[in-house]
Image (cartoon, rainbow, N blue to C red):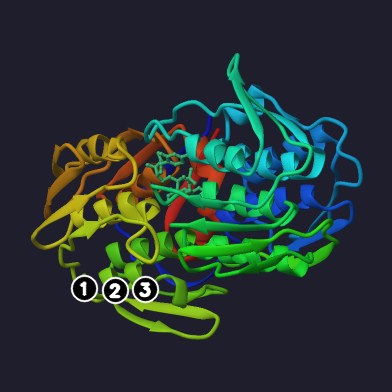
């Protein structure tokens, strides 16, 4: 199993290019199921989750071709097998995103229930309830969701919790439904907007994406399209925190600062100088960071996917901070690992109190989920001496070439197999 070995204490400096967004790429790839024509995606990140999604779509009969840059062509002319097996779904929860498109296009789908995961229960009841409101007959048996509908019909759907993939699944299904669907309390995440833009380019009639009410007027068929995936705001945020925590000076090329307000605000509060350009973000930090309180909530508030990285920053900041996690019930696994590096963190329920220490010390730690891994990398970059991070396969699910990119910024980091 691969490990990352980091010699800490180097301030990150230089330029790095931000990749396409994982959380946009995954739903966009599923959108290909809605049309018999090819969907061509560019700026696709090279990630394990993307490979898993390509395998899943391939098993259904989608023709997949890759070019030598970051382009993928997905052609779902015939969907021979509208099934997502447990073997792949268990490795990637976002596989649930095939459910809506399969049902809308094929009239039936069989998708494994994702089950729990390291950060919490993460049910999919709202995906199921929404599809049922659109007329689907759904049974959950033997660990699988079996869904049927001759043709979905438009409906008014209220989601009592803001769910990102739930909104995306229902928005995709509604594109081919008979009549108009209104999604209320929809997720406003930029990835939902990116997906809506691609669906509109495929002929879908969607308004309101980016607000909490999305309206979809169903059409009979969608056609092919070409779409460039938006930059990854979580990768961007992760590099910015790493630079701020190490007292660095970086330029992130291909980044979009306009979808990162909550994160940039907290970094400025911590003492960073930030300049947002049209296609880049610059960050400089010339002092020890100040502690910042963080409370996660749906977009445009502070993203849960950046919580762990800020905990690493707070671990060495001046002062005491409170981090509150409101989205997932078990998302503090990194705190125990950060303590192994000398962080002073107290957890009570969904709140962590972090007292900044003068210095972290390198140690061996274990990655438990994707963003927890990112926080351990940041902690390793700050710590004195050698940090070894075990189980980094989590990191490979969501960060493209992370050690190459960090090396480019001067970090002493290597992978050992
Ligand atoms: C997506 C992101 C993930 C991010 C999360 C929250 C992708 C591929 N993943 O995950 O990186 O951390 O949004 O921003 O885009 N819930 C229910 N019932 C449901 C669905 C969700 O109760 O049917 C709850 C969840 O347990 C959680 C909350 O709603 O407490 C938000 O989850 P959700 O937005 O659905 O997360 P994902 O879409 O799985």
Where residue 403 appears, as percent x and y from the top left, is 51, 52
Q: Are marks 1 and 3 in contact (CB under 8 Å)?
A: no
- Residue drawn at point x = 70 percent, y = 57 percent: 179
Residue 86 is left or right of residue 71, and the answer is left
As displayed, is residue 324 above or below residue 260?
A: above
The residue lying toward the viewer, choosing from 137 and 223, is: 137
The residue lying toward the viewer, choosing from 165 and 406, is: 165
User: Mark 2: few, some, or many residues within 10 Å (few <14, many ≥20)?
Assistant: few
Please give the residue where the numbered disc 3 appears in the rendered image: 261
Residue 258 is left or right of residue 111, and the answer is left
Q: Secondary structure at mark 1?
A: helix
How much space separates mark 3 and mark 2, taking CA atoms? 6 Å
- Residue drawn at point x = 67 percent, y = 43 percent: 100
Where residue 67 appears, as percent x and y from the top left, is 83, 57
- Residue drawn at point x = 40 percent, y = 43 percent: 373
Name the quarter where the C terminus is drawn: top right
How much space separates mark 1 and mark 3, taking CA atoms? 12 Å
Please give the residue where the numbered disc 2 appears in the rendered image: 265
Where residue 135 appears, as percent x and y from the top left, is 66, 39
Q: Nearer the viewer, mark 1 or mark 3?
A: 3
Q: Are marks 3 and 2 in contact (CB under 8 Å)?
A: yes
Q: Secondary structure at mark 3?
A: helix
The residue lying toward the viewer, choosing from 200 and 389, is: 200
Residue 346 is left or right of residue 42, and the answer is left
As displayed, is residue 101 above or below residue 268?
A: above
Q: Are marks 2 and 1 in contact (CB under 8 Å)?
A: yes
How much space separates mark 2 and mark 1, taking CA atoms? 6 Å
As displayed, is residue 121 above or below residue 159?
A: above
Which label was assigned to residue 269? 1
The answer to which image quadrant residue 292 occupies is bottom left
């Amino acid at each position: 199993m691969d490990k990352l070995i980091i010699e800490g204490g180097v301030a990150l400096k230089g330029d790095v290019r931000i990749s396409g967004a994982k959380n946009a790429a995954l739903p966009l790839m599923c959108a290909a199921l809605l049309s018999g024509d090819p969907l061509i995606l560019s700026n696709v990140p090279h990630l394990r989750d993307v490979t898993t999604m390509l395998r899943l779509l391939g098993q259904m009969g989608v023709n997949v071709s890759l070019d030598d840059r970051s382009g993928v062509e997905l052609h779902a002319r015939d969907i021979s097998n509208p099934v997502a097996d447990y073997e792949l779904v268990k490795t990637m929860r976002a596989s649930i995103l095939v459910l809506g498109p399969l049902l809308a296009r094929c009239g039936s789908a069989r998708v494994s229930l994702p089950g729990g995961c390291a950060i919490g229960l993460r049910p999919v009841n709202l995906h199921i309830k929404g599809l049922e409101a659109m007329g689907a007959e759904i049974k959950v048996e033997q660990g699988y969701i079996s869904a049927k509908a001759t043709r979905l019909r438009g409906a008014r759907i209220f989601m009592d919790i803001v769910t990102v993939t739930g909104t995306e699944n229902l928005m995709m299904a509604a594109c081919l439904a008979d009549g108009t669907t209104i999604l209320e309390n929809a997720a406003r995440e930029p990835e939902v907007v990116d997906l809506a833009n691609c669906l509109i380019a495929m002929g879908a009639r969607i308004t309101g994406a980016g607000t909490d009410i999305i309206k979809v007027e169903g059409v009979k068929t969608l056609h092919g399209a070409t779409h460039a995936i938006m930059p990854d705001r979580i990768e961007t945020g992760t590099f910015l925190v790493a630079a701020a925590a190490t007292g660095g000076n970086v330029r992130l090329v291909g980044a979009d600062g306009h979808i990162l307000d909550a994160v940039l605000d907290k970094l400025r509060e911590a003492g960073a100088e930030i300049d947002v350009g049209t296609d880049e973000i610059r960050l400089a930090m010339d002092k020890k960071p100040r502690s910042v309180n963080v409370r996660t909530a749906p977009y445009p508030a502070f993203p849960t996917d950046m919580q762990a990285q800020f905990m690493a920053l707070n671990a060495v900041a001046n002062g005491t901070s409170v981090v509150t996690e409101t989205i997932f019930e078990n998302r503090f696994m990194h705190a125990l690992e950060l303590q192994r590096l000398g962080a002073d963190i107290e957890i009570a329920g969904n709140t962590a109190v972090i007292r900044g220490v003068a210095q972290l010390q390198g140690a061996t730690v274990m990655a438990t989920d994707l963003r927890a891994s990112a926080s351990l990398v940041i902690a390793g970059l700050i710590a004195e001496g050698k940090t070894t991070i075990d189980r980094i396969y989590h990191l490979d699910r969501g960060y493209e070439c992370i050690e190459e990119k960090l090396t480019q910024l001067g970090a002493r980091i290597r992978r050992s197999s």
